[in-house]
Amino acid sequence: MRKRAASGAQRFVVHEHKATRLHYDFRLEMGGVLKSWAVPKGPSMNPADKRLAIMVADHPVVYIDFEGIIPEGSYGAGPVVVWDHGTYEAIEAGGAENQLGAGKFAFILNGRKLKGAFALARFTRGEMGKEWLLMKKKDEHADPSWSLKTELTPKRLKELAVKIPPCETS
């Protein structure tokens, strides 16, 4: 189990998830749950990339460590691995939940792969307010040549076959 974040920081995780289609679930620990977005093309360290992020249902915090195969017939059936994890901190004062509620949240990620300043911004004319953009901000961690690499290798898929999901959502 991952340790609780230091004071002022909260945890985040990015799950690589091959359900109907491969996507990445970006999750921020906030208010006792994991606020979650499905990111079809995955996050990027390139500030030129603006990634669609569809807000999905909050997940229990216990899901932060989950890796395994969600069984056929269950919502989100398919393999899930932790692609990245670490901590995040809001850049601006005012509370992360309030900023999300207002449709814009800027934060610093300190993960194994994702580092530096990022932002989530909700589309103003999106379908029911669930469409957001996940963007890397220009800083010393930005990398225009960055490319996303999968963790769902054949070896990892064999390892996952013995794990059981903590809940029925993804």
Image (cartoon, rainbow, N blue to C red):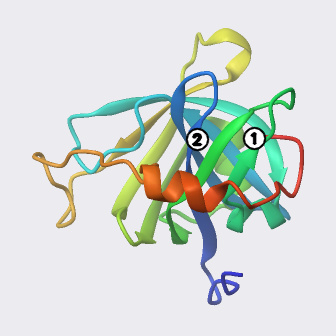
In the image shown, does 8 or 110 lie closer to the viewer? Answer: 110
In the image shown, does 55 or 138 lie closer to the viewer? Answer: 55
Q: Is residue 82 left or right of residue 111?
A: right
Query: Residue placed farthest to the left in the image?
Result: 145
**Residue 93 percent across, percent down from the top left:** 58, 66
Q: Do the residues labelled 1 and 2 touch (CB within 8 Å)?
A: yes
Q: State the CA–CA distance, disc 1 to disc 2.
A: 8 Å
* Residue matched to label 2: 17
Q: Which residue is drawn at 55% across and 51% down?
A: 157
Vertical position of residue 115 compared to residue 103: above or below: below
In the image shown, does 10 or 162 lie closer to the viewer? Answer: 162
Q: What residue type is labelled 1?
A: Ser
Q: What residue type is labelled 2?
A: His
Q: In this view, does 54 lie to the left or right of 44?
A: right
Element class at badge 2: strand
For residue 109, the mark is: none
Question: Can the viewer see residue 31?
Answer: no
N-terminal of the two: label 1 or label 2? 2
Q: Residue at x 53, y 69 (%)?
A: 88
**Residue 94 percent across, percent down from the top left:** 65, 61
Vertical position of residue 126 compared to residue 93: above or below: above
Q: Is residue 29 left or right of residue 133?
A: right
